[in-house]
Amino acid sequence: MSLMTEIAIFVLAAFVGFEVISKVPTTLHTPLMSQTNAIHGIVMLGGLIVVGYANDPLEYVIGTMAIAFGTINIVGGFLVTDRMLGMFSKKPKAKPAAASAPAQVKDSDLDSPELPRPGAADDK
Amino acid sequence: MSLLAVLQPGGSAATALYIVAFSMFIIGIKRGTHPSSAKQGNMIAAGGMLVAVATTLLLNGIGNWGLIGLGIAVGAAIGAIASFRVQMTAMPQMVALYNGVGGGAVALIAWSELRHGISVGGAIPLETLIPTLFAAVVGSVSFWGSNIAFGKLQEVIPTKPLKVPGQQAINALLLIGILVACVDIALNNSGPSQGIFIAILVAAALLGNLVVLPIGGADMPVVISLLNACTGLSAAAAGFALDNVALIVAGTLVGSSGTILTMEMATAMNRSVANVLFAGFGGAPAAGAARGEERPVTSIGAQDAAIKLAYADSVVIVPGYGLAVAQAQHAVKEMANELEKRGIEVNYAIHPVAGRMPGHMNVLLAEADVPYEQLKEMEEINPEMPRIGVAVVIGANDVTNPAAKNDPNSPIAGMPIIEVSEAQQVIVIKRSLSPGFAGIDNDLFYEPNTSMLFGDAKKAASEIAAEIQNL
């Protein structure tokens, strides 16, 4: 790919980033920052390429560390975002229950099977 | 292995798959901006990542599978365990840490890319070398800066601004030194010195430390968001160096979207990003003046608080980070339930930077099953304050400080606040009169219609709930 093509892609991607993100409710700022944070974990691909084609010991060490770091960034980032958003997504169901019997909401909601939330155990 | 290695690096098939991957990132981020589709958006982005990683693993000539497996296994295990274990209150630190390792990965890849260039021999083309240097510097700054931000939020490092004399001058010198060294490497691109490159990494590490250390804890969200954008850009630079379109697009997307988020957060605090980075505010200014005089406060117990609340028409709860630290969200919800049983209208007033990141408090209250429609934003609740019977401030401080509105000399002057002092009565649940994250005294505590209830937020809220039940 020529340098100019890459720069064109860069500029267009920058505009897409600006456009796609505007007007986010404050509520979603933290999850969204966490999600974009996970996306830059894509540098892990660089680690794969380095290690994949490497042939000296220091390169192995540097590259493997880069893969591990990048993978932490990706796996941790997406999982944590999912945990945060899991807490919002039960909202619509909580609404009718909350109006009639607020005290009962917590338990019934935690037990709902379609929401496997990793954080559920700490909630009690 | 030859069976797996089916895609030519830079070939049409690999590029097409990368295009699929980054399209999924764009859709994922877009969905992430709406409450109903955010979870799905995150899944789509994660799916895009899977496509990108799988594509790279299928590239022709990729070997050393043992090391690749090791790196992925270790990283996935640490990432997964950390995410399951982390408390919702510690989310901002976690994001800082993940951002830091991302930056670290970029810096390491840049180093390795330089070594690769040297080992191939001949002049390294500048279109590879310049992005490599950029990735090294920004990645290293981001790694160390994020770790300091983590340390401050985790309170391993003092949250107050730490100032070194001549700070700005040292930073400027470091930056100039880094630039000179980069130019030197670029000019000697036929045989660049690895020693100088490592010196650049170290200088950038120092710069990352020195830039973030003087920033007060209250400003950390802005810093983390800015570093997030920086890591994105450095990933894009690594993409230029490696000729990888997925890296360029994904990194740039994060860079530009992160910049917008950073500016929105700074706006919520009525500060510019430059001000956050260079002012080093917090701690010193108000402490001297306010501490000198002992001002009287009204202190009450849980029973009095219960009576005040039980006979109000409407109650607004103003939660702050103290609520989160005390894990009081469930106790507060119980208290609200008791009030609602008595037909009292209960709402929650959420300051844009309540907690330690925009939206952090919403996550915490959602965890305690507080109904979404009871969460009111600052602009929504402030005009209604005069008709509110009792405003209960729980573990919040700076975001309720009337000095932001009344005292033009206050360090937080002009910061939008939740105007609880406009409510008929105010109850502040707090451990002591100590100043908040910004390190300044709160005039609210000394207002005639304010009562202080000293104690742990969780214990106090449970006691009030019990007292209301007994009334």
Image (spheres, coloured by chain):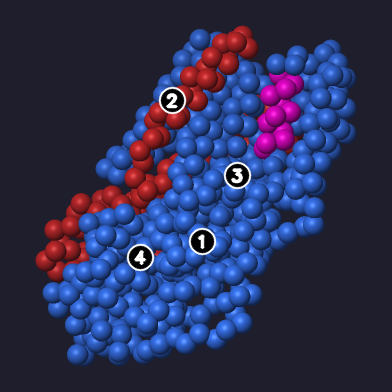
Chain colours: A red, B blue
Q: Identify which amino acid the numbered label 4 is placed on.
A: Glu
- The numbered disc on residue A22 is none
Q: Identify which amino acid the numbered label 2 is placed on.
A: Val
The residues tagged by marks 2 and 1 sit, at their Cα atoms, a distance apart of 40 Å
Q: Which of marks 1 and 4 is nearer the N terminus?
A: 1
Q: Identify which amino acid the numbered label 3 is placed on.
A: Ala
Q: On the picture, is B182 further left or further right than A9?
A: right
**Residue placed under numbered mark 4 in the picture:** B419
Q: On the picture, is B4 further left or further right than B313?
A: right
- The numbered disc on residue B408 is 1
Is there one chain holding both mark 2 and mark 4?
A: no
Magenta highlight range: B128-139
Is there one chain holding both mark 3 and mark 2?
A: no
**Quadrant location of the C terminus of chain B in the rendered image:** bottom left
- The numbered disc on residue B274 is 3
Q: Nearer the viewer, mark 3 or mark 1?
A: 1
- Image spot of residue B351 (x, y percent): 38, 58
Tell me the chain of label 3: B
- Image spot of residue B402 (x, y percent): 43, 67
**Residue placed under numbered mark 2 in the picture:** A16
Picture quadrant of residue B157: bottom right
Is there one chain holding both mark 3 and mark 1?
A: yes
Q: Which residue is drawn at 14% across and 69% down?
A: A101
Is there one chain holding both mark 1 and mark 4?
A: yes
- Image spot of residue A123 (x, y percent): 36, 66
In this orientation, does residue B374 appear? Answer: yes
Crowd rating for badge 4 (residues with CA inside 10 Å; few <14, some 14–19, many 20+): many
Q: Nearer the viewer, mark 2 or mark 4?
A: 4
Q: Identify which amino acid the numbered label 1 is placed on.
A: Pro
Residue at disc 4, secondary structure: loop
Q: Is the magenta stretch mostly helix, strand or loop?
A: helix
- Image spot of residue B187 (x, y percent): 84, 19
